Image (spheres, helix red, strand yellow):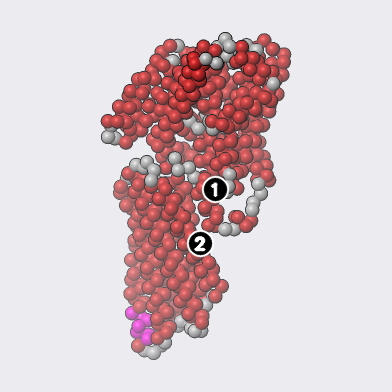
Amino acid sequence: MGISDVGMIFKFVGGLGMFLFGMDMMAKGLQQSAGGKMKQWLGVLTRNRLMAVLAGALITAVIQSSSATTVMVVGFVNAGLMNLTQAIGVIMGANIGTTMTSWLVSMNEFGSVLKPEFFAPLLLGIGALLMQFSKKEKRKLIGEILLGFGVLFIGLSFMSGSIEPYRDSPLFSQAFVFLGKNPVLGILAGALITAIIQSSSASVGILQTLALNGMVTWNAAVYITLGQNIGTCVTALLASAGAHRNAKRAAIMHLMFNVVGAILFGIIATVVFLFHPEFGGSNVSSLGISIFHTVFNVTNTIILFPFAPMLVRLAQKILPVNEEEESNPVHAVQQRLKEYRLDTPAFAMEAATHEVLDMGKLCMENVKTALKAMQDNDSEAVDTVMQNEEVIDDLEKILTEFLVKINSLHLNQSQSVQIRNLMYTINDFERVGDHAVNLAELAQTKIRENMTFSATGRAQLQTIGDTVMSVLDHAYRAREQFRTDDVELVEQLEEKVDNYEEEFRADHISRLNQGLCTATNGVVFLDAISNLERISDHADNIAGYVLFEKKSGAEKVRVG
């Protein structure tokens, strides 16, 4: 090996680095610019399994990463926004969408004007100017996308140039002849390379670069490409390690889907090459690899699509429900948060909103349980409130930490407003939980002292309690549905609670003065309606944040 060979190796490694870096830069720019739209696509297109396939293909074509799509989908499954049957549809579509990069690489064969080295410098120049001098965020993102494309194509050109001197080397030709005659080794080679560089798009791009120089045979290309589709599952498998079971199930479904497809196509290809050895031994073009890559993924989806429910059931049998894990809500949330991709803020925010609303449900349930404890002198209800409060406190901490992580990302102004208001919402829900605990402690006192309220007192407590639950319900729906109708109802009902609190306080003091009620009973009753009034104040805050977001032009965060 001479100095020129070392130089070519350096050139190939540098080209590969630029190719990967450019792909990552381009993908991040596309994700940030299209994050909100992707969120809407998922909401509309995953309503049935067929549309879920389309959603997976579209989103992956945009973000240029089937692994990223798979990991994102896992988060939605665990948040309850998507079931596993819909998820397998998106995963199938992701395999189709990931072929987009191979078509970009194959443009070399459509004429000199479309060769990367021809227009890559222009993309680099325009992209750099937009990123450096543009003040508008959207233009900066366009610049990042163009710059990523430019770096990707320059890297591709470097790789191609470093390999060209060796196009007639017997080492390469013998290696591909060997892999072409050994399907299992060819598939393993493709899977290993893809697993190492964590990108099927990049590994297929390398194979196409070799094909551009006439160094790859058809049979070797087919087996290696099949292996590359298996290797891309490694990223999702690694991402699901130590995560929630649904994450592992989604990763397993992805692996099963690609392995079954590789086996089917591997058998068919072996038979074809056996009867047509001259075809298998002929050189494949870069375009030919793109065509096969696409045909494989589309056909594999068509064949296995009817069996999607079977893949879901098989994944569930491989990883059955762990009752201890599922019964711990804090642990479940922690595991789900590990799976949400922070490199796509729109998806992370949607997941966070869903988790905050789940916390809100628990707080509302605690208020309802505390009211039952007050009215019925129910000590078991008191214990339930205290246990739930520990969960609420833990959820407040981990959800706030997650939102702080999202807030450190590259967010637009609308997203920043939403994150801040979600933090405020968490705080208000936690305060609702605290007031529920206060009510439970008052119920404890009532039980311990064997107190009973008068019929009027019980009726008044029921009236203000029911109204407060209505305020909470409409505040919850205002956040969930992002509707001003519910905000207006919250304002009206909260004012009614304020009036009830003043009226019932005056009535109770009157009963105390008349000797119809003891002083101890009076303290408990007045503290109870005071806590209920404070709960309605926090519910009003939660609805108010939604109104503020509406006025600031923020988009609705879909939560189911």
Q: Which residue is drawn at 36% across and 22% down?
A: 123
Q: Which residue is drawn at 48% across and 60% down?
A: 394
Sequence-wise first label, 2 or 1: 1
- Please state which of residues 553 and 122 is positioned toward the viewer in this rendering: 122
Q: Which numbered dot is residue 391? A: 2
Q: Quadrant of residue 214?
A: top right
Q: What stretch is highlighted in magenta?
A: 506-512
Q: What residue type is labelled 2?
A: Val
Extreme residue in the front direction = 2
Q: Is mark 2 on a helix, strand or loop?
A: helix
Choose mark 2 or mark 1, whichever is in front.
Answer: 2
Q: Quadrant of residue 38?
A: top left
Q: Look at the magenta stretch and give its main secondary structure.
A: helix
Whether residue 296 appears in this view of the structure is no
Q: What element carries label 1?
A: helix
Give the x, y percent position of residue 542.
Answer: 38, 58
Circle 1 is placed at which residue position? 78
- Please state which of residues 296 and 15 is positioned toward the viewer in this rendering: 15
| Distance between the alpha carbons at the discs numbered 2 and 1 | 19 Å
